[in-house]
Image: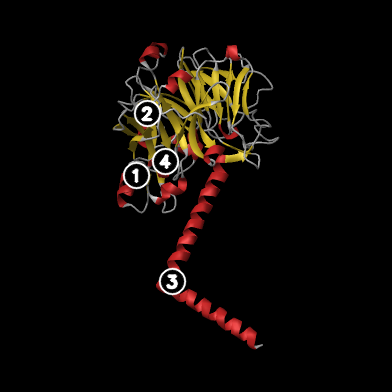
Amino acid sequence: MEHVIRLLSIAFLAFLYGFVAQRFQLFPYEQVNAALTQATTRFQEENVFKSHYLKAAPYDRYGTRILSASDSQPGLTLITSYWEDMGWNAGIKLIDSEGRVVHRWRTDVIELWPDAPDWVKVVGGYVHGSHLFDNGDVLFNIEHTGLFMIDSCGAVKWHLDHPTHHSIARDSDGNFWVPGNVKLSRSEPQDMKYLRQYPGLTPTAKSPVYEDRLLKVSPEGKVLADISLLKVLYDNNLQRYIVKISKRRNGDLLHLNDIDVLDASMAAQYPLFAAGDIVVSLRHLHMIFVMDPLTGVVKWHATDSWIEQHDPDFSGDGWITVFDNNNDFGGHSGPRRGEMLGGSRVVAVQPDTGKMKVNYPQKDGELFYTKTGGKQQQLENGNLLLTEAKAGRVFEVTATGELVWEWINKPNDKNQVAEVMEGTRYAISPDQVASWPCHIPQ
């Protein structure tokens, strides 16, 4: 009995000291607090990664398959994803047609931005949108963290500290159009005053309004234009789609996910538009529109032919080609994957005639599906390079829909595959890569 009383007394004194230590920050308060912070950060990092970027693998294969080398567009493919040999962290790899890595770039935000705020370190290096230069420099977004330009050695040439996100598109002058956003909170008086010009929106303390912006950025990282998408919608009487389709009054209202520029070389093929006009994709409104960025005038818009789409491109002959996610509530893998609407598609619309066509798939048995993400690239030989984001897959098909090349990310030991944000084919050779200042092959 005496032994039990002694143990209870020790437990009580330990509890009492723990309370006092917490209240007055005595030893070991700092050590315990640091351990809790580290554990919390690790928990957040692992859960953010696992919940968003690792999904059950829908395919029973991985690696590269070449089904018709002669029909494939020559070049190297740039892939942004998460990699086993990088500790399942984000990074960029350049691969050849056999899947061999000819160069790689680490995109660890802590390495690239040592003075980053703590919240950036928790979010991690979610790479979304990229552009490769001939000399091995690469420009990319770390989602909602900023634009980074690094050289072939991985050294930072410049960093735009702005919440940029999603795609990167280069215009004929060498400048880049990049999505950005700003957070407008009810707790900030200046934000509330600013939002009065956009009636109907209701930011709260817990759910601010995220105002998407269209940013034009120079090759040196200077912002040349900053256009409010809310202003574009309200000025063009398109705010009704916020009510009609999205019904959001705060939070991520529009979800801008892509911008593309009409080049002067093909402007004559688009009777409604002019060189320098931009096409914009708003996922939450299921909307694509074309506008003059100098005047803010929207010249054409459409919402009926796709569901939560990505990546509209001016593809020639008056067509705008779109990656239609066709999100139908199906899971990322399993029998319900794309079961209601038949999976994702690549569609094209001709604004001046109203015509529409499906470029892929064109026949049964070609199901592919990613409810979010996704990219499409029209290649010089007429093929399509498609990024099936949540499946961790990049694949190439001919104009008639025949699969000629495929790469799938390697799953982890739980048969979960890391998503691919972007796959892009570049007309460069391994010999060119070998001439870069730093050549980092596999």
Q: Disc 4 to disc 1, how far (Cα)? A: 22 Å
Q: CA distance from mark 1 to mark 3?
A: 48 Å
Q: Amino acid at mark 4?
A: His
Q: Secondary structure at mark 2?
A: strand
Three-letter amino acid code at the position of disc 1: Leu
| Mark 2 Cα-neighbour bin, 10 Å: few <14, some 14–19, many ≥20 | many
Q: Are marks 3 and 4 in contact (CB under 8 Å)?
A: no
Residue under label 1, please give it: 195
59 is higher (above) or lower (below) than 405: below
Mark found first going from the N terminus, 3 or 4: 3
Residues marked 2 and 1 touching at CB (< 8 Å): no
Q: Secondary structure at mark 1?
A: helix
Q: Which residue is rendered at x = 49% and y = 53% of the image?
A: 41
Dot 2 or dot 4: first in sequence order is 4
Q: Which residue: 53% across, 37% down?
A: 82
Write down the residue under mark 2: 177
Residue 297 occupies quadrant: top left
Disc marking residue 27: 3
Give the amino acid at mark 3. Phe
Q: Nearer the viewer, mark 1 or mark 3?
A: 3
Of the pair 352 and 84, the residue shown nearer to us = 84
